[in-house]
Image (cartoon, rainbow, N blue to C red):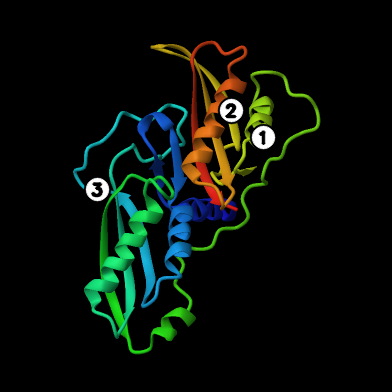
């Protein structure tokens, strides 16, 4: 029961599995990772400090096609997202100016030029006013989620040659992609590289699911696309049908 409770807490701490890019990209990022990236960008903004941040689907927004069977369980279908953020503001500048500065930074960090999230709305709420702007810079911001333990043993490449089409071959191909820091296993019970053949009603297919850490100097969506292409190519030999790959970015490290 202790292990089960720990697993549940860690899965909740990952937050939502948010879509990256377009539906055909088959890419997601954990909310925890996305929020951490947003905090890093906004930490340098003068006069504001982020509090709690959530990223969630826009209510009644258009929904893209159903997620691939390769997608991780609980992945949010591709649809417009909104950021809900609370922040403290320093006195000295008009509040609308500070809010617009923060909103612009969040849009840029989350959108096409940053993480690659389909963010369409940024909702802000002021939770406090501070006389001294330096106090905002010196005080720590609250974490978006509870702390996670180390992931479930990051996978690494083996020196032994991998048989084409296997998970080992896929992992070796993915680890050679620029910007892929490592293969992870943040989702409890799921391998960092999972290859599954299926005989469904619509025919046979091979599904590949990846969990990756992207290097912080690389755009997550770019890494996900390149990793997906490499994984699909490596998984094709011996596949019973079309290969579909889904990528989850779990860390930026």
Q: Alpha-carbon neighbours of circle 2 within 10 Å: few (<14), some, or many (≥20)?
A: many
Q: Is residue 244 above or below residue 129?
A: above
Residue 44 is marked as none
Q: Determine which of the numbered discs, if any, sits on residue 176 in the image.
A: 1
Q: Which residue is mark 2?
A: 230
Q: Report the residue marked by disc 3.
A: 58
Q: Earlier in the sequence, mark 3 or mark 1?
A: 3
The spot of residue 115 in percent (x, y) is: 44, 49
For this view, does 86 lie left or right of residue 184?
left
Q: Image quarter for residue 42?
A: bottom left
For residue 97, above or below residue 15: below
Residue drawn at the location 41% of the way across and 45% of the way down: 116
**Does residue 212 appear to the left or right of 132 in the view shown?**
right
- First of labels 2, 1 by sequence position: 1
Label whose residue precedes the other's in the sequence (3 or 2): 3
Q: Nearer the viewer, residue 234 or 152?
A: 234
* Cα separation between marks 3 and 2: 32 Å
Q: Are marks 3 and 1 in contact (CB under 8 Å)?
A: no
């Amino acid at each position: 029961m202790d292990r089960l409770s720990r697993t549940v807490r860690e899965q909740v701490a990952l937050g939502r599995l948010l879509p990256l890019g377009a539906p055909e990209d088959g890419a997601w990022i954990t909310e925890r990772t996305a929020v951490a990236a947003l905090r890093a960008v906004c930490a340098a903004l003068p006069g504001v400090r982020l509090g709690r941040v959530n990223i969630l689907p826009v209510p009644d927004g258009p929904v893209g096609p159903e997620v691939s069977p390769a997608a991780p369980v609980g992945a949010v279908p591709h649809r417009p997202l909104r950021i809900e953020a609370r922040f403290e503001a320093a006195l000295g500048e008009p509040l609308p100016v500070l809010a617009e500065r923060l909103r612009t930074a969040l849009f840029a960090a989350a959108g096409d030029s940053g993480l690659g999230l389909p963010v369409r709305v940024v909702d802000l709420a002021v939770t406090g006013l501070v006389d001294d702007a330096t106090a905002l810079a010196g005080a720590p911001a609250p974490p978006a989620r509870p702390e996670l333990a180390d992931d479930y043993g990051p996978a690494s490449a083996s020196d032994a040659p991998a048989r084409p089409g296997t998970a080992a071959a896929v992992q070796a191909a993915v680890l050679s992609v620029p910007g892929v820091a490592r293969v992870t296993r943040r989702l409890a019970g799921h391998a960092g590289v999972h290859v599954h053949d299926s005989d469904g009603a619509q025919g046979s297919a091979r599904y590949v699911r990846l969990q990756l850490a992207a290097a912080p100097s690389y755009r997550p969506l770019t890494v996900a696309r390149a990793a997906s292409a490499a994984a699909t190519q490596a998984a094709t030999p011996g596949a019973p049908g079309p290969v579909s790959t889904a990528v989850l970015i779990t860390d930026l490290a």
